[in-house]
């Protein structure tokens, strides 16, 4: 379901919820891989503003990890996928010359 309606705003919340259930309750590999890929596609440099400001979707995810949280429940079978996320994160850091104040992906990798 999450692949069939991927990108359709009408089904997006339902698809994401179904994907989370498949990961958390069933450790479904296809569901997990889809979420890993989505995180890589959404990854972007972010320098956190100080003081009062509007919080956008990326900053919200940095703090709450709402989308990434299901992946933190996975076991070591997915270590290669977590390493790929870490690589994406480090690439962003290099491209942004270290100005990224938070690395969302790093917060998802268990044990870091």
Image (cartoon, rainbow, N blue to C red):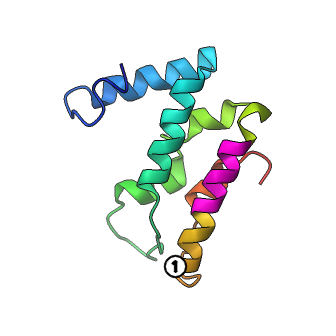
Find the residue positioned furthest to the top.
26
Name the residue tied to disc 1.
95
Q: Nearer the viewer, residue 77 or 108?
A: 77
Q: Nearer the viewer, residue 20 or 94?
A: 94
Q: Is residue 67 magenta?
A: no
Residue at the spot x=47%, y=58% of the render? 43
Give the image location of residue 90, x and y in percent: 63, 68
Please state the extent of the stretch shown in magenta in the rendering.
80-88
Residue at the spot x=30%, y=23% of the render? 4
Give the image location of residue 84, x and y in percent: 64, 52
Whether residue 84 is situated above or below residue 35 in the rendered picture: below
Q: Residues within 10 Å of mark 1 (few under 14, many from 20)?
A: few
Find the residue positioned furthest to the bottom.
97
Give the image location of residue 10, x and y in percent: 19, 28
Image quarter of residue 3: top left
At mark 1, the secondary structure is helix
Image quarter of residue 98: bottom right
Q: Nearer the viewer, residue 24 or 48?
A: 24
Residue at the spot x=60%, y=25% of the render? 29
Q: Is residue 81 magenta?
A: yes
**Number of marks in the rendered image:** 1
Q: Is residue 34 left or right of residue 6?
A: right
């Amino acid at each position: 379901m999450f692949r069939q309606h991927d990108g359709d705003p009408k089904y997006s919340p339902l698809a994401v919820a179904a994907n989370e259930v498949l990961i958390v309750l069933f450790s479904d590999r296809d569901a997990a891989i889809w979420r890993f890929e989505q995180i890589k596609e959404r990854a972007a440099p972010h320098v956190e503003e100080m003081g009062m400001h509007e919080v956008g979707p990326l900053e919200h995810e940095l703090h709450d990890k709402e989308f990434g949280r299901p992946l933190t429940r996975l076991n070591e079978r997915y270590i290669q996928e977590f390493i790929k996320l870490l690589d994406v994160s480090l690439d962003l850091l290099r491209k942004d010359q270290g100005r990224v104040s938070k690395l969302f992906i790093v917060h998802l990798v268990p044990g870091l």
